Image (spheres, rainbow, N blue to C red):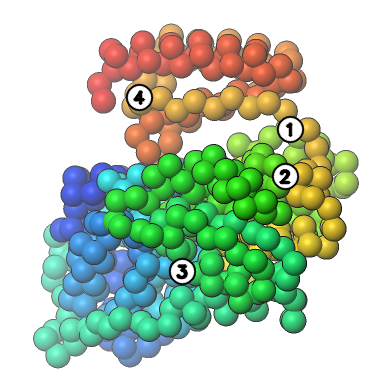
Amino acid sequence: MVVRRYFGTDGVRGAANAAPMTAPFALRVAMAAAAHFGQAGQSPRSARPRAIIGKDTRLSGYMFEEAMTAGFLAMGLDVLQTGPIPTPAVSMLTRALRAEVGVMISASHNPFQDNGIKLFAPDGRKLPDSDEAAIERLIDDPALDARLAAPEKIGKASRMEGAVGRYVEALKAALPRGRTLAGLRVVVDCAHGAAYRAAPQALWELEAQVIAVNTAPNGRNINAGCGATAPEALAKAVLDARADVGLALDGDADRLIVVDEGGAVIGGDQVLAALALSTGAREVVSTVMAGAGLDAFLRERDVRLHRTSVGDRYVAEAMEATGAPLGGEPSGHIILREHATTGDGLLAGLHTLMLLQDAGAPASEALRFFAPMPQVLESLAASRAALSTPAVQTAIAAAEQALAGQGGRLLVRPSGTESCIRVMAEAPDEKAAQSVVAKLCACIRHSAQGSPR
């Protein structure tokens, strides 16, 4: 297992202007990424290597965008700045424009006070652990400064015009030729985030009747009571507009949550099941968070479900290894391998809308295929060290045994995107799952009080 100092399950993330997410650190990340992927005179792809930098709408995005631009320029890479754009668009542009490296400055679903850095390889894929480890070593290596470009090889920076339009065209090209969404009344919640222009534009160009909400970012309102992590706002908008369906995206638009015509959330496992049927997939990849209901549904149809660690990059790696055309997470990251190399909330949403249109039935019927086994998830502020105490280990073992006797399961893990521990229990009896989670969380909190942070 590769031990990483800075990178979590989805890049580097933390409070903006506090270690590690400071401007000097971001500059260093850019320098290290340039050295890793090839700088001027060393790139196997181009004599003038380039980097793509996208961002969401956080106030701190300006600071990190300029810091990373400076780092790349200093190493001899040209830089194309896209401005606010979804994470999957950065992936697509990195590949399409033959860039050496792609960067998305975003903390995804976190509040505006946080920010993060996601890196993409030249093929548009998120980096494997080995590449992240190599970049970490370069970040901390004093000798990196000796690799700065000569004055005549310093890079140039420019704003990329039309990046959003190019992404929208790629989305439309991922649908059957001539296909529209005419006749559907759709609410899309853009979370005041990276897709505030792309999502309404794509839906309108595909002839859906669009009601777009939360499309006025001010640097501080991203994900604030809206978007994929707060679907209540979308549910109300769907009911008020008498819409057929609602789509909620998160801050960087790589995640999708669907709400039916009655305002009820349709879980990510249900969306994955719907797409599995429509694509005819024989193999599907999801994470350890996928519910038992999805597993049983797919197994009954001779579809194999592969499970990975949490994180859509692990899902993408397993899809590549198994040849699975479809993968995703219950949280809403969905990957359609024919069209994308990373989670794309808007792309998944468009394909879901096609399914709904073809079904000719309400979303509450057309997009629900099985009764999910109840899951209870709680996040608590505690360090990884709290999990290693004998008392917590004993409590975890007891909880696992209790749930296994009911046909359920337990998952306890440190978050890779936030400073917390997540405890998930799944059981046929929701009250039993709630009881297990409550007792285990109390034990972890007690342990954390005596553990160094």
Query: Which tag, 2 or 3, sits closer to the chain's start?
Result: 3
Query: Which tag, 1 or 2, sits closer to the chain's start?
Result: 2
Query: Which tag, 4 or 1, sits closer to the chain's start?
Result: 1
- Residue 270 badge: 2
Across and down, in percent, residue 75 comes to 21, 76
At 39% from the left and 45% from the top, the residue drawn is 224
Whether residues under marks 1 and 2 lie with C-beta atoms below 8 angstroms apart, the answer is yes
Q: Dividing the image into 4 quarters, which one contains the N terminus?
A: top left
| Residue type pointed to by label 3 | Arg
Image: 307 above or below 444: below
Q: Which is closer to the viewer, label 2 or label 3?
A: 3
- From the viewer's side, name the closer residue of 343 and 62: 62
At 29% from the left and 17% from the top, the residue drawn is 451
Across and down, in percent, residue 221 comes to 34, 50
Query: Which tag, 4 or 2, sits closer to the chain's start?
Result: 2
Query: Which tag, 3 or 1, sits closer to the chain's start?
Result: 3
